[in-house]
Image: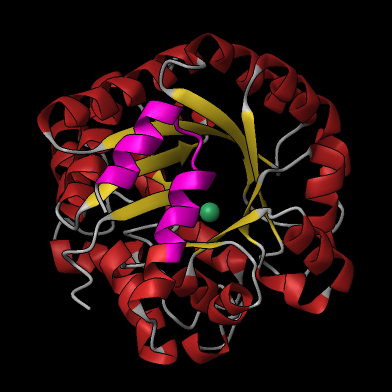
Amino acid sequence: MNFLALPKIELHCHLDGSLRAETIIDIAQKEEIQLPSFDKDELQKELIAPLECESLDEYLKRFALPNLVMQSKENLRRITFELFEDATRENVKYLEVRFAPLLHTLQGLGVEEVIQSVIEGMRDAESRYEIKGNIILSCMRTMSAESAFEVVEKGKKFLGNGVVAIDLCASEEESFCKKFVDPIALAKKYGYRVTIHAGETGIGKNVLEAVEMLGAERIGHGVFIKDCAEAYKIVKERQVVLEMCPTSNVQTKAVHNYSEHPIYKFHKDGIKVTFNTDNRTVSDTTMAKEIHLVNNEFNLSEEDYRQIYLNSVEASFADQETKEWCLAQY
Ligand SMILES: [Zn+2]
């Protein structure tokens, strides 16, 4: 299969993990921001998490640098546009981008301004290219429940107008769901769809709790349902969709290598899986690369790919018209 040419849907991509190194250098030069290096190759070494990270927390350290240049409306708009532009080059038809608005308020931007700027960047790309998108607002699990309420409240006015869902991300602790029951329930009440990062770092039970306590419709990663029978059962029975990101999982040591990744086994067992990059820059990857790597290990058939594409369209938080457009692209 020619993976580059195949139409693609991506549901799990972090904006701050997917910046072009050239853009970081360009903005830093204009705004006199200190970088460890202004040489693209050298800077890339700082941005890309090695395949041999110790843990998710080590992987997450790579996000400090991009966030330095993501503190103005203009930059957020540009960075979002460029991510969509990069996605079109490998035939991504629909992209759900996620970011934590509170990380971009360090130089005075309001949460609404941050969200508005990202929506504008996405609209710029939609009007120029054959791609459509939506935005997922991430709340940092490392922050308070109040901070999650703030994101839910301030993002509300953009619902149905670029914003579709809420997410919890960052470092994963056991039983993190409890703390966020109220803000996620409020988000649901407002009409946000719900996807939660869970089961990324060894704790399959978090997936069970994300589904039962938070009403997660999709799970970011979910690798460790493999070791938790109850979580596996609920994901399979309720057809909760897993947003899987193989390279990221190798980097964070969720799995030791690609052959150990459960994506294909899950798929064959009737669990709904999807392909995603997680972070194009930090994981030094693309959708085509992720599909290629999985194919290398498991020899995907065209039917496997088609099924995963259909899963992705169906599981997207897009409206019916957009879903039909995505189906027509295949
Ligand atoms: Zn993620």
**Residue beneath the point at 38% across and 69% down:** 305
Q: Is residue 153 above or below residue 13?
A: above
Task: State the image quarter where residue 80 is shown.
Answer: top left
**Residue beneath the point at 43% across and 21% down:** 115
Q: Nearer the viewer, residue 302 or 97?
A: 302
Is residue 156 highlighted in magenta? no
Q: Nearer the viewer, residue 37 or 282?
A: 282
Range shown magenta? 307-328
**Residue 70 visible within the image:** no
**Residue beneath the point at 71% across and 36% down:** 143
Judged left or right of residue 300, residue 19 is left
Coordinates of residue 174 in the picture (x, y in percent): 84, 59
Q: Nearer the viewer, residue 137 or 262?
A: 262
**Residue 252 visible within the image:** yes
Coordinates of residue 147 in the picture (x, y in percent): 69, 25
Q: Nearer the viewer, residue 89 or 70?
A: 89
Quadrant into which the N terminus falls:
bottom left
**Residue beneath the point at 84% across and 33% down:** 181
Judged left or right of residue 227, residue 195 is left
In the picture as drawn, the residue positioned furthest to the top comes out as 157
